[in-house]
Image (cartoon, grey):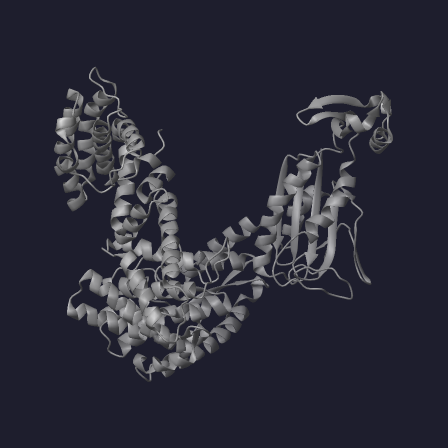
Amino acid sequence: MATFLLEVGTEELPASFVSEALRQWEARIAPDLKENFLEPAAIQLYGTPRRLALLVEGLPDRQPDRQEEVKGPPAQAAFKDGKPTKAAEGFARSRGVEVSALEVRQTDKGDFVFVNQAIHGRPTAEILTELVPQWIFGLEGKRFMRWGDGDLRFPRPIRWLVTLLDDAVLPLTLENGSEICTSDRISAGHRVLHPAEISLTHAQEYVDTLRNAFVEVDSALRKQRIQEQTEAAARSAQGVAVISPDLLNEVTNLVEWPTAVVGRFDPEFLELPPEVAMMEMESHQRYFPVRPAADANTLLPCFVTISNGDPAKADLIAEGNGRVIRARLSDGKFFFDADRSQPLEAFVDKLETVTFEERLGSVRAKVRRIGAIAAHVADQLQLAQSDQEAVQRAALLCKADLVTQMVGEFPELQGVMGQKYALHAGEPEAVANAIFEHYLPRGAEDDLPQSLIGQIVGIADRIDTLVSIFSLGMLPTGSSDPFALRRAANAILNVTWAANLPLNLHQLLKTVVQDFVADPAIQIADAATLENQLSDFFLARVRSLLQDDRQIDYDLVNAVLGDNDPDYAERALIDLLDVRDRAQFLQSIRQDGTLDQVYETVNRASRLAAQGSLDTQSLDAATVIDPQAFQQPSEAAFFEALQDLLPQTQAAQAQRDYRKLITGLAAAAPVVSRFFDGPDSVLVMAEEATVRRNRLNLLSLLRNHARVLADFGAIVKG
């Protein structure tokens, strides 16, 4: 069995491309080999800033010989009067066989000609020669470039190519205009620590040979070494390293032989908010900040940088990096001091110069709308006057830091700096915290806002974005969601559920759309259509979050949202807490077996009730049932069971205690079964209209009681 090595040597690649390229190769190479009847024992992928490599172990010398069945033309076209036609002869010739080797077989589409052909396996080297260029130039990514005078495109110029099958060079040439890159066994070591060329004698020696030349090609080992060195370096400075996973991944692909170096800066820069200093270090310089071991909210005046240079010159490297970060922090301190020279409110009117969306006006206009929407939410939640004032103040200031110098330099700090500047200006802590929290959650890993003021302003901000963008007809389609509207809707729902806010989203959307209609600066063609689009969008997000995040079975989600049932859809948006609770309750009673006790009875009743004319809201049997029309004791028993069930259903409606409702349905189940199948069972669809209507009404009432919880017709029996 053979080992194949491919190394594509380049000038320094973007860090993001290295990991992305290896992911693409991981998805492609094994299937390509399998398609060519080559299944290796293992495939290893390696990458550094200057190379992408793969090592394929356990390759056979050639493909196995095999029999291949090939389908040809229809028999009717291949043979006429028992003799082969030109179609048969051409097919045989194309497969390299005699006409006598053709067979006629019956298929579901008629008789066709087939041939069983012996295929001799091709040499592995020949196949690899065809696949390697596809693997290299099949990679996709951003900002590919041309170099020299050729047409080849890659993120950086390709400078060498190693293709070894065991100890033999697999001949391969990449032509790029006048530049020709021919495969060889010559690789390159570390630029500084081993500038001489490396001659690889065997594919299996690749990793060790490069390691001896101060290149760690294994990304996982390089990442582990960086983390361990960074933590040790921070300990040497009596601190703890702040290691962002994203930064760790990036730095891993910026170096080939990592060395952790501790650098320092002037303590005066610790007067900056830690978020600013960390952003300067991480975003601009790719440094790891260091904090005191006992305090996660402050920093030490030092950092850890990962050098790709000579470890013997660590002190010189540390000094140079220290000079750079001091300049960056000086800029940050200038921005910070300049921004704080005036109160945060002074920046609000400057938002007129920032466009939210060309047809929707400025961010200042958006802030006005956020304030109005936040007022609607506060009214729904019946906030005290003092809290309503805090909501309005937070809404006014929530975007003000967008036009500060610090956020202009670091957009990621929006909200963070708003909170800092608000506190500096003497704003109430609740207002300052809400400015920060209204952006939460920013991503999947973020916490949700904890303060009611922050929750309300965040909901208002996202509602405005959704209504605004939908009003322009820019609805998300497929994977395209440039305004992150799905994430905005998810945040509204998650915040509402986490904080148990009694939010009537149905009414809120209707009110906000009407406000938009009344705004002369915004043109809305059809308010009703806009409301329906927003409602459908939110219902889709409710469905997704219940199924994906809360692990509710799909049919139970259908049951609480209804199957194209506007009553259930509207009810879900009117009471978001209730739709969540009903879904979770259904899941719990499915798991404990209670659902099985009522499912068959309710479902059977619901199917027959569809043939009746009773509405879906009536619950009181006394108002719609005529006991004089009973012909069997089972009907009277059914009637009594419904009367017993009524107070339990009413309690479920009033208190959302659906356990009482399901207990009542379970108690009624034997009575309903007797109605259907007992010794005094009845024929529901009786010939006499009054009797038939009475029996259908009994079933309809049972269905209506069950509908208070869910549409049982949407539930699939387990």
Give the image location of residue 235, x and y in percent: 40, 59
- Report the residue that reaches farthest toward the front: 688
Q: Residue at x 78, y 36 (%)?
A: 123
Above or below, comparing residue 306 to residue 544 in the picture? below
Along the line of sight, which residue is nearer the eye, 639 or 569?
A: 639
Query: Does residue 437 appear left or right of residue 287 in this picture?
Result: left
Q: Please say whether residue 451 is visible from this viewpoint.
A: yes
* Quarter of the image that includes the C terminus: top left
Give the image location of residue 439, x and y in percent: 35, 64
Above or below, comparing residue 226 to residue 264 in the picture? above
* Quarter of the image that includes the N terminus: top right
Q: Residue at x 27, y 49 (%)?
A: 571
Above or below, comparing residue 294 to residue 302 in the picture? above
Q: Please say whether residue 254 is visible from this viewpoint.
A: no
Along the line of sight, which residue is nearer the eye, 590 or 19?
A: 590
Give the image location of residue 574, x and y in percent: 26, 53
Along the line of sight, which residue is nearer the eye, 198 or 658?
A: 658
